[in-house]
Amino acid sequence: MLNTVERGDGPPVVLVHGFTQSAGSWWPLVEPLEEGNRLVAVDAPGHGGSARIEAGLAEGADLMVASVPAPAAWVGYSMGGRFALHAALRHPEAVSRLIVVSSTGGIDDPQERAARRRSDTALAERVESEGLESFLAWWVEQPLFATLPPEVARVEERVSHATAAGLASSLRLAGTGSQEPLWDAIPSLEMPVLVMAGALDEKYVAIARRLVSTIGPNACLHLVAGAGHACHLERPEEFTTAVRGFLRG
């Protein structure tokens, strides 16, 4: 079982964080979601209280479903969105609604996927050789997070809830390079789906549009104005307003 943290009471909403974060990463921004909901934040394999658990995306999604209430609405950011997509496809009875934030159905091209897998392996070796603090300080300075203020990135919190071994395992087993593309399976999703991305994150805006068109009429798109990849951290009010509206149907 994976480590989970709960707050609130009502219909369950599962929260799955991104790479280098933890269950606690959600609490500074989701207070508006607590009213009328039971929030269940899960530590993904290799992270937080689940740091010693090694699992890929499919096995990790199975572990998450076994660790949280069902059926539930699921919210997944970046890596967490990929876990949530796997959960919804493998266990559709457990996912009543799905919110995918700054995430992807995978890399189609085998050569590009292999190159990304090599990059993920290199990152794993980097965190093992450099250590946690140095790696995380470097990680949040990547162009992907150019619009994320340092005080919102909360590097010290990430350091306190991570291990180098856990992050390295996550990169090797659950990195985008290890993910088999889900695009052919995604049209089978029948639950309501909200796809979100930061309007400034051009790569993931394009992926978000593809996700919505691939899923079909049960999917809708919300682009968070003035935000980049970590749009939920950069514009928490807009993010939670959109999520609350979607959860209310």
Image (cartoon, helix red, strand yellow):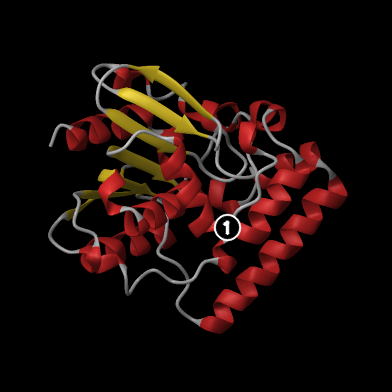
Q: Is residue 230 left or right of residue 158?
A: left
Total label count?
1
Q: Residue at x 70, y 53 (%)?
A: 169
In the rendering, at what x and y percent does residue 24 appear? 53, 26
For this rendering, which residue is in front, 155 or 51? Answer: 51
In the rendering, at what x and y percent does residue 17 appear? 49, 39
Three-letter code, disc 1: Gly
Location of residue 216 (image quadrant): bottom left
Observer able to see residue 54 = yes
Q: Is residue 183 left or right of residue 148?
A: left
Observer able to see residue 222 = no
Is the residue 119 above or below the residue 125 in the image? below
Q: Is residue 122 left or right of residue 157?
A: right
Q: Residue at x 55, y 42 (%)?
A: 44
In the rendering, at what x and y percent does residue 52 appear? 70, 41
For this rendering, which residue is in front, 203 or 7? Answer: 7
Q: Which residue is mark 1?
A: 56
Q: Residue at x 36, y 58 (%)?
A: 90
**Which quadrant is home to the C terminus?**
top left
Q: Is residue 244 left or right of residue 45?
A: left
**Element class at badge 1:** loop
Is the residue 81 above or below the residue 212 in the image? above
Is the residue 39 above or below the residue 205 in the image? above
Work out which residue is located at the far right of the displayed protein and give it: 129
* CA neighbours of label 1 inside 10 A, class few (<14), some (14 to 19), many (20+): many
In the rendering, at what x and y percent does residue 134 appear? 80, 41
